[in-house]
Amino acid sequence: MSGILLLLAQSVVYFTVMAALFRGRSVLGLGAFFCALGVMHFLETYLAAVFFIELPFGLISPGSTVLFSGKLAIILLFYIREDAEAVRQPIYGLLIGNFLMVALVAMLRLSGPPVSLPGYNPDLALIDQMGLLMVWGTTLLFIDAIALILIYERLRGLLARSLVVRAWLSLAIILTFDQVAFFVGLHWVTGTPWSALFGGWIAKMGAAVVYAACIGIYLAVFERKAEETAPQPLADIFHKLTYRHKYEVLLGATSRDALTGALTRERFTALAPAMLAQAIDSGRPCSLLMIDADHFEQINDSLGHIAGDAVLRRIVETIRGHIRADDRLFRYGGEEFVILAPDLAATAARMTAERIRQAVAEALADAGAPAPTISVGVATAPDEGRGLEVLLRPADSRLYEAKRLGRNRVVAGPALDDARATMS
């Protein structure tokens, strides 16, 4: 019984300190939290390999049960209160830092034995064993952290109102996987007895309960007013966790139209097929909005090209204020723009297009006579096509239909008469 109380006390102390650092992130910054999260990894691995206590159900390692399980719980708490792009920072920091430590130790070992000191003989065999376990443990930590977040999000559909239960199930699943995977490496390297496999699993299931309860208490007491981040498709979360999302954003930033700041047509050609395919492959809709500035030649002729350029910039600024972070805005031609909006169904796309149309009309009401407006054609995959060229055709056709009907309107399909939003 005393051993169980010891593990419970350690778990509470660990979570309390780490949660306090996380709570103080607005004052201390995240640096203190990140350093505390990463500094104990060597100790975790060392204790998991050599330090066990005997409990009625088997051998238990505090390093694995308390420290490693607690680290995963803290990473999950970080994700719940922040987002995937924030939590990937400690995940990658731990991966790179731990591999760097192993590489530096390996360089020392390959350079030759250390100088003998009186009364002390370094345990080089233990150092070699720890190096192997650090590599294996660090790899598992990286996999565990990403899989933990994905499983937690997957459970939202089943347990939308039970955050603590979601956290517990997510931790239990990942800690089960980790216990088996790490024990295989531990047994191969050190010969740890099989009784540690079952005993460690029982202890980790208890740790999952304790840490899930700690997460719930922390959120209820200290951040009860903060809303949980909105659910996102698993593919999007995975891309953010693996930096694919950031890569696409940075790549797009290097290819922006100098006048308006929208992405160029070249970027549309490069990015749009992959965005569309990704949405369709994951079973989600993707809408394309084709936008054209009405009577733009007349604006240039009556007010001049400088005024016309200002109109285009204001149109883009207004559109950006009415699209989501994951939507992409491209300058397709002179006064023609395209929005590609993943995870936006046909009805929502039409409503978004109408909001944009109204916002542009209001924003540019003072920009000349007649006031600049836009016309919009909308098409949605996969219902209207699964390829980019196939989707562009109905969007372009509806844009010209909007022009023919008098401009300053949205036309969406497939039934034009039912989908038109007339001039307000």
Image: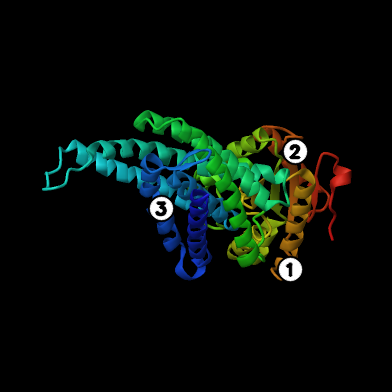
Residue under circle 3? 38
**Depicted 390 relative to depicted 32: above or below:** above
Tell me which residue sits at (75%, 46%) in the image: 377
Residue 371 rendering spot, x and y as whole percentages: 74, 65
Query: Which residue is at 46% across, 50% downward?
Result: 67
Query: Residue beneath label 1, please?
Result: 365
From the image, tell me which residue sits under label 2.
394
Residue 54 position within the rendered picture, expressed as x and y whole percent measured from the top left: 46, 42
Q: Secondary structure at mark 3?
A: helix
- Would residue 178 be seen by someone viewing this image from the given angle? no
What's the CA distance linking mark 1 and mark 2?
A: 29 Å
Asked whether the viewer can see residue 337, the reply is yes
Q: Amino acid at mark 1?
A: Ala
Horizontal and vertical percent position of residue 111: 16, 38
Is residue 165 left or right of 401 when viewed as pictured? left
Label 1 neighbourhood size at 10 Å, few (<14), some (14-19), many (20+)?
some
Give the residue type that dot 3 points to. Answer: Gly
